[in-house]
């Protein structure tokens, strides 16, 4: 047995020694494409020679810091390994600390990663400022990306990591191009756009798994900042963390066909921006469609704009187990809570919403009302409304100033709702509105399997009086926030301890729901990290231990 182990170790050492990883250097100042590119003094000048080599496990492509490179870097059929990934990064040149810049120039993408595994990209800046002029597809929409990660084969590809990457100013059209008024009303846009980071699985049988996008920054793109798209369950194990996404013409982030995602500690600001006429001009901070088991927590969603949707974060149809917790949602035109049709066991809990849902239908081209709370049965134009099913909404703190009418819509197709322990601080009366722009959705006859009790309202008209869907045991009073309208969490610590302390009820499964929330209905801490001890308090912030004594 010992001999076998020794032989195995010898073989392992021999294999490791036989792995001849190569570093390739690219320097636009001192390089020459006729060089071998294997040292800083023998570097290439452009990205072109990369097309002529086959990268293998452990190889690196290193760009000189402080320099700009034009063209598309293409990584196609690249296979690294868990121990020896293929690395795209930088090396220090003349002490510069600036990221090297890859500009797409005349190409569609600045970086293409196609049908590849175990690839790591870090410390690179990517852009596409110049308009794309090589299109031969007349009348067909094309996309231009800072980074495109793509699967086109029926195989499993895994472990793509983007870390500390900057993507900005990616546009398809020339500056001054203007979208039509009708374009913004289409579901996702029909024309050509620039995107930040796009992940696409074009196959039904192929899989992309273990994708990480960490500490990246995306801004000034004409559509979505970070987007992952595939058939159901075709993109698995997605983590996006500590990213900044802002001034995007479309949504900040959007996911379709993703299973098992963790989206956390990101900042998304000014999605749906109209700062550039090439922008789509509409989009939620984040939204999911046909996704399963997605945890969205500790993010900030601010200033989403658009005539429809454009909530801080919303759950589009055909999802299950999408949990939205510990987030700040502020000043988003479309609203706070939006759960569409055919969704199962989704939740908003321990979030703080500030002045969301201010949009007014008919004003500035808006075709949907902004809504602070919306359960919609919409699941496509050609389908009858259905659901959402078993929606949980508890321990949220929602503040709406007097200049905004808080609007609420609940489809009569909804089945199973839990609403408890929330603070609804509305400075004016709430109103019932139609939900979707195409199908009127208002609860007239009531919704089955409802637990709606023990919520704190500033005043009796903070829930529509004409609604059949009502709190059966409401609490009224002022939680005494320190600085209403602020977007700082500390300003929503309630000072009225008698009204808040231990006044929450236990969260239980909705009647006839055997699932609840897969990660558990009970949480261990609040949005600030304070532990939940004994009965929960009202709202998203648990009062400190000394106040509970």
Image (cartoon, helix red, strand yellow):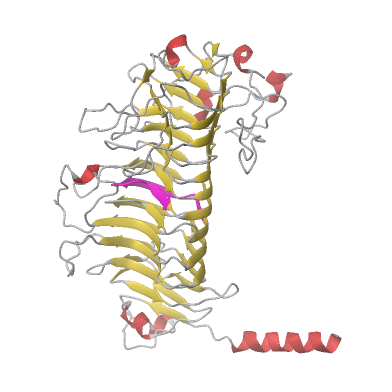
Establish if 295 lies above or below 522. below
Q: Would residue 265 be seen by someone viewing this image from the given angle?
A: no
- Image quarter of residue 353: top left
Region in magenta? 239-255
Task: Determine if the magenta segment contains residue 322.
Answer: no
Specify the quadrant of the image occupied by residue 507: top right
Judge by depth and name the residue closer to the eye, 59 or 422. 422
Please state which of residues 307 and 486 is positioned toward the viewer in this rendering. Answer: 307
**Residue 193 figure quarter:** bottom left
Q: Position of residue 197 (x, y in %)?
A: 38, 58
Q: Residue at x 44, y 32 (%)?
A: 413
In magenta stretch: residue 250: yes
The residue at 28%/35% (across/down) is: 438
At which x and y percent is residue 295? 54, 45
Residue 119 coordinates in the image, percent (x, y): 49, 70
Residue 289 sits above or below residue 305 on the image: below
Relative to residue 28, is residue 76 drawn left or right? right
């Amino acid at each position: 047995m010992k001999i076998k182990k020794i032989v195995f170790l010898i073989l392992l050492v021999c294999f490791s020694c036989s792995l001849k990883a190569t570093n390739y250097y690219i320097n636009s100042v001192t390089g020459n494409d006729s060089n071998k590119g294997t040292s800083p003094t023998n570097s290439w000048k452009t990205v072109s020679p990369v097309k002529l080599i086959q990268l293998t496990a452990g190889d690196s492509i290193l760009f000189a810091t402080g320099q700009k490179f034009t063209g598309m870097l293409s990584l196609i059929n690249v296979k690294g390994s868990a121990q020896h990934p293929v690395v795209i990064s930088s090396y220090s040149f003349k002490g510069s600390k600036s990221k090297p810049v890859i500009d797409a120039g005349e190409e569609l993408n600045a970086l293409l990663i196609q049908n590849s595994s175990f690839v790591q990209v870090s410390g690179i800046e990517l852009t596409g400022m110049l308009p794309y002029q090589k299109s031969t597809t007349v009348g067909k929409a094309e996309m231009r990306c800072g980074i495109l990660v793509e699967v086109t084969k029926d195989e499993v590809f895994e472990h793509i990591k983007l870390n500390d990457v900057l993507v900005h100013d990616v546009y398809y059209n020339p500056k001054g191009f203007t979208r039509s008024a009708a374009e913004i009303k289409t579901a996702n846009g029909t024309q050509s756009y620039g995107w930040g980071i796009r992940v696409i699985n074009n196959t039904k049988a192929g899989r992309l798994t273990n994708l990480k996008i960490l500490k990246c920054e995306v801004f000034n793109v004409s559509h979505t900042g970070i987007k992952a798209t595939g058939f159901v369950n075709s993109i698995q194990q997605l983590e996006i963390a500590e990213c900044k996404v802002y001034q995007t013409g479309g949504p900040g982030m959007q996911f379709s066909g993703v299973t098992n995602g963790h989206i956390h500690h990101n900042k998304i600001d000014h999605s749906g921006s109209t700062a550039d006429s090439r922008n789509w001009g509409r989009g939620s901070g984040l939204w999911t469609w046909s996704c399963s088991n997605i945890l969205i927590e500790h993010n900030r969603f601010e200033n989403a704009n658009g005539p429809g949707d454009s909530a801080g974060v919303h759950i589009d149809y055909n999802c299950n187990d999408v949990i939205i917790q510990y987030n700040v949602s502020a000043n988003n035109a479309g609203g706070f809570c939006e759960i569409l049709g055919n969704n199962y066991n989704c939740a908003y809990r321990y979030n703080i919403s500030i002045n969301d849902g201010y949009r007014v239908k008919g004003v500035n081209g808006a075709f949907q009302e902004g809504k602070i709370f919306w359960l919609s049965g919409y699941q496509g134009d050609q389908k009858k409304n259905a659901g959402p099913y078993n929606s949980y909404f508890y321990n949220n703190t929602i503040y709406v100033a007097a200049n905004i009418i808080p609007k609420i819509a609940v489809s009569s197709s909804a089945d199973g709702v839990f609403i408890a322990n929330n603070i609804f601080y509305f400075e004016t009366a709430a109103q019932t509105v139609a939900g979707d722009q195409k199908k009127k959705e208002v609860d007239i006859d009531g919704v089955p399997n409802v637990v709606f009790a023990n919520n704190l309202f500033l005043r009796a008209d903070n829930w529509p009086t004409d609604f059949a869907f009502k709190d059966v045991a409401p609490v009224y009073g002022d939680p005494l926030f320190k600085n209403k309208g602020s977007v700082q969490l500390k300003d929503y610590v309630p000072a009225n301890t008698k009204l808040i302390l231990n006044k929450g009820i236990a969260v239980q499964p909705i009647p006839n729901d055997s699932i609840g929330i897969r990660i558990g209905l009970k949480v261990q801490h609040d949005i600030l990290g304070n532990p939940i001890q004994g009965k929960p308090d009202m709202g998203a912030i648990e009062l400190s231990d000394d106040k509970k004594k």
